[in-house]
Amino acid sequence: MEKNKHIGICKVGEKGQIVIPKEAREMFNINPGDSIIVLCDKEKGIALLKADTIEHLTDKVLG
């Protein structure tokens, strides 16, 4: 059965780096070398998106 949800905990390292939990990387097919977009809103929090998600939307908008 494929899991659609995951909760994980990350620690922030001295250089501000985090490790995305393995389950989340597998769920979203995140691999070494992939680019991640960080969206920030002080009230709503932080969201991470694979860059290819935005590239797909850009292709739709620009044709």
Image (cartoon, helix red, strand yellow):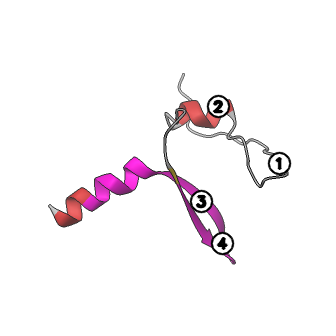
Quadrant in which the C terminus is drawn: bottom left
Q: Disc 3 and disc 4: Cα gap in Å?
A: 9 Å
Which of pointers 2 and 1 indicates the residue nearer the eye?
1
Which quadrant of the view contains residue 59?
A: bottom left
Q: Residue at x 56, y 30 (%)?
A: 26
Residue for badge 4:
44
How far across and down, in percent of the image, does residue 33 sit? 51, 37
User: Amino acid under label 1?
Assistant: Gly
Contact check, label 3 and label 4, Cβ < 8 Å: no
Question: In the picture provided, is 60 more to the left or to the right than 45?
Answer: left
31 vs 57: above or below: above
Badge 4 density bin: few <14, some 14–19, many ≥20, Cα 10 Å: few
Q: Residue at x 61, y 40 (%)?
A: 5
Q: Disc 2 and disc 3: Cα gap in Å?
A: 17 Å
Q: Earlier in the sequence, mark 2 or mark 1?
A: 1
Q: Earlier in the sequence, mark 2 or mark 3?
A: 2
User: Amino acid under label 2?
Assistant: Glu
Badge 1 density bin: few <14, some 14–19, many ≥20, Cα 10 Å: few
- Label 2 sits on a secondary structure element that is helix
User: Amino acid under label 4?
Assistant: Lys
Which of pointers 3 and 4 indicates the residue nearer the eye?
3
Residue for badge 1:
13
Residue for badge 2:
23
The range drawn in magenta is 37-58
Question: In the picture provided, is 57 more to the left or to the right than 34?
Answer: left
User: Amino acid under label 3?
Assistant: Ala
Q: Disc 4 and disc 2: Cα gap in Å?
A: 24 Å
Residue for badge 3:
47
How far across and down, in percent of the image, does residue 3 sit? 57, 31
How far across and down, in percent of the image, does residue 34 sit? 49, 40
